[in-house]
Image (spheres, rainbow, N blue to C red):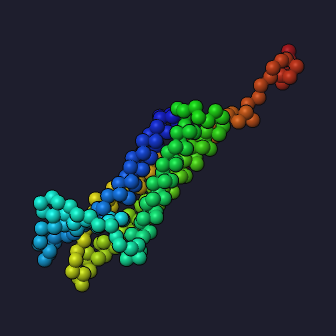
Amino acid sequence: MGAAGVQIVCVALGVLGLVAGIVCCVVPKWKESSFTGQNIVTAQVTQDGLWMSCVVQSTGQQQCKTYDSLLILSADLQAARAMTIISCMLSALSVLILFAGADFTTCVRNEAAKPKVTLVAGIGLLLAGVLLIIPVSWSAHNVIRAFKNPLNPQKMELGACIFVGWAGSVLLLLAGGLLCCFSRVRPGSSGGNAKYYSNSASAPPNKNYV
């Protein structure tokens, strides 16, 4: 696969990772009520997200309420808000930069600058993946620790956004890694490696004498 094909794949991976980051940021399913052990009441399900908490009734009716204050949130959710938003912004900007410097576009005319532009996009996607996987893993760790605590009466399980965030971060890291590996300066693109001789006077002397 050529450089253009790899860049097209990285664009697709970056867009999918961006969509996963937006889903994690918007959808309130970071943790859900657990019905294991003594928790057998399934009349309603509590779902917590970054911005609101929802209660889903057994009839399908859903009621959501935004958090009253930022200070009542745990440290992992406070950090997750900032890191998830920065990850989405950085991944979107990196995909746009990749479009500008890709081989299948003509936004950047200088062929020597295109590998540098794609390298910047790759580093941005790597940072976006790291910023997404940190809060997701942190929240998952806290949910699992609280679930295994016997003194905690209200058990919560991992929500769908945790798994979506893990998948999105892997896609972003994969796209950034591929771009960093394939973004190399092409030999002769800067004009310093190739030598041309326009006439016989400037040509190197021929040492094959008879």
Q: Quadrant of residue 170?
A: bottom left
Q: Is residue 152 left or right of residue 127?
A: left
How many marks the image carries: the answer is 0
Q: Residue at 22% of width from left, 77% of height from top?
A: 154
Please, is residue 183 above or below residue 104 in the view? Answer: below
Q: Residue at 35% of width from left, 54% of height from top?
A: 23
- Residue furthest top in the image: 210
Judge whether residue 175 can be spotted in this image: yes
Between 55 and 165, which is closer to the camera in this rendering?
55
Q: Residue at 49% of width from left, 39% of height from top?
A: 7
Between 181 and 23, which is closer to the camera in this rendering?
23
- Residue furthest right in the image: 201
- Residue furthest bottom in the image: 151
Please, is residue 84 above or below residue 19 in the view? Answer: below
Judge whether residue 174 can be spotted in this image: no
- Indicate the quadrant containing the C terminus: top left, top right, bottom left or bottom right: top right
Q: Is residue 200 left or right of residue 124?
A: right
Residue 20 position in % (x across, y down) = 37, 52
Residue 145 position in % (x across, y down) = 31, 76
Q: Residue at 53% of width from left, 52% of height from top?
A: 124
Residue 86 position in % (x across, y down) = 48, 59
Residue 17 position in % (x across, y down) = 41, 50
